[in-house]
Every structure is written in structure tokens, then in C-alpha cells.
Amino acid sequence: MIDDKLGSYITSAGAMAIIAFRIVFRLYLRLEFLADDWIALAGLIPLVLRLVCEVYFFKFGSMFRLNAESWATLSAAMIEQKQLGSKLFIVVRLSAFTILWSMKFCLMVFYRRLVSDLPSYDLPARLLWVFLITSYIATILTAFLECRPLHVFWTAIPNSEMCTQMLVSILTGAILNLVTDLFLVIFPLQIVFKIKANLFKKIQLTLLFGVGFLVIATQIPRIIQQSFPSNEAKYNYTLHQDPTHKLKKQGNLLCAIEIICAVFVANACAIKSLFTKWKSMKKKEFPQNEVA
């Protein structure tokens, strides 16, 4: 079975590779960068930041669920490392939210361009934009405001249960993430059902845009795993027996899987469009009736 850390690293690297392929492919075709290309490129920043912070979080550990007995055995250097690990975990969470929402913005820019000549979809697109932006702000604010004062997250022993479990932040982010993804799937599909096209073309477009359900499916196990932890994770444990730290590693892996699925969905349509343009350019460069 793949280790949680290794699995998280591999999926994070895969997400970076998808975005990098899109950017390099566009550069290869010498096409002008569009707004969603820049958003996708900017999405690499939180992806890299999350991966780097995750490496050191796994290395240093954290202050989560350390009891007073374990606290007394820690040296000053170990305490400093674990406090840093707890701070890095906050960055990991915020980076994950930023990655997911940047991919939503990327998709929305692409969809907005598709309906630019359809006035009836202008208002729904604007409302969806407002919902995406406000949901991102709400998710970030909840992550900061749930644990007050914030330094309790990395200094208090024993940790506040609210700061350790972060259920409000998890559920807020999960619900808003799920709802926004659902809207981002429904928005293009309703257009596909109404356009005049043959059945094969409609099926093809439905599969292309409906791949967004993959992201929704990956969210369910992470919500269950983090919202309903096992009983052993509800108690304080010693330095070497903390199941909560393992729980967070597993949560990070599920989050990384969700991220790579979101990145794939957000870039699939654009990459398909680039391949179509590449084929068109090849046909112009090498006409079928040209004799070698």
C-alpha cells in the first residue's frame, strides 16, 4: 500500500505536471495567453507552497494532541520544530483551498468565454462568479476565525479541541467546495442539452463537462474521514502514539487526490482545445493532398 506521504507527494507532482503541460503546450503552439491560462499558471504557486510546507510538516510533526506528560519530555528545539509544523499545517490548508478555488476560477473564465455570445447566460454567469468569490472568502475567514486567538493552534497544551479538530472550518470548506463544484458542472451541461447538435456530439460534450462529477466524488471520503474521526483520535496521546497526526496525514492524501482531480477537470477542456488547434495547424502545414 502506498505510504500517505508518498501518495500525497505523487499526486501533488501530478497536478503540477498537468498545469505545466498546458502552459508548455500553449507556448509550443505560440498562442496568446488567455485569462484562464494565467490563472492556471498562478495556481502553481499555492501547489508548490503546499508541497514544500507539507514536506516539513511531516518531518517536524505538530503540537496536535500532545498531553502534558509528552510536553515535559520535549526539548526546546523539538518544541520549536513542532510549533513550526503546526504553523505549516495552517499554510497547507489555506494553500489547498486556494488551489481548489483557483481551478474553479479557471473553469469559470473558460465557461464565460463559451457563453460570450449567449446573452441569456450572462446573468447566471455573473451570479456564479459572485458565489465563487464569496465562498472562497468565507472559507479562508473560517479557517482563521475558528481558533481564537490563532496562536493557540500551535502553542497551547493541551490543544483546544476546537483548534485541533477544526470541524467548523472543515465542514464550511467542504460544503462550499461541494456546492460550487456542483454548480460548475450544471452550468455547462444545461447549455449542452439546449444546443442544436447531433446526439454523438452532445454525448461527447456531456462526458467532457460531466467529468466534474469526479471531483465531487473524491470529496465525500475526505469529508467523512475528517468529520467523523475514530474514537482513538479523540483523546490525548504521547509523543510517539498520536493517532491524530496520522489522521492528518491521511487527510492530506485525500486532499491531494481531490486537488489533482480538480486540476485535471479545470484543464481538460483547455488542453482538448489546444489539441484541436494543433491538429488544425498540422493540416494547414501538411495538406492531405500534398505529395511528399
Image (tube, helix red, strand yellow):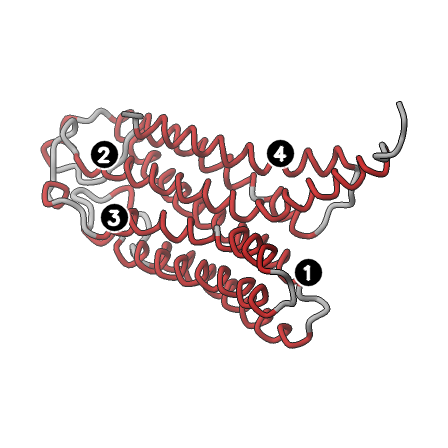
Instruction: Please name the residue that numbered disc 2 is placed on.
Output: 246
- Which badge, 4 or 3, comes first in the chain's sequence? 4
What type is the residue that disc 1 sits on? Arg
Where is residue 58? Give x, y as percent: 32, 29
> Is residue 282 shown left or right of residue 121?
right
- Which badge, 4 or 1, comes first in the chain's sequence? 4
Rendered image quadrant of residue 63: top left
> Which quadrant, please, contains the N terminus?
top left
What type is the residue that disc 3 sits on? Gln
The residue at 73%/69% (across/down) is: 117
- Which badge, 3 or 1, comes first in the chain's sequence? 1
Residue 115, placed above or below residue 14: below
What type is the residue that disc 2 sits on? Lys
Query: Closer to the camera: disc 1 or disc 2?
Result: 1
Instruction: Please name the residue that numbered disc 3 is placed on.
Output: 226
Where is residue 271? Give x, y as percent: 63, 42
Mark 4–mark 2 distance (CA, rounded to whole Å): 33 Å
> Is residue 169 shown left or right of residue 205?
left
Query: Closer to the camera: disc 4 or disc 2?
Result: 4
Residue 84, placed above or below residue 173: above
Mark 3–mark 2 distance (CA, rounded to whole Å): 12 Å
Q: Nearer the viewer, residue 194 or 151?
A: 194
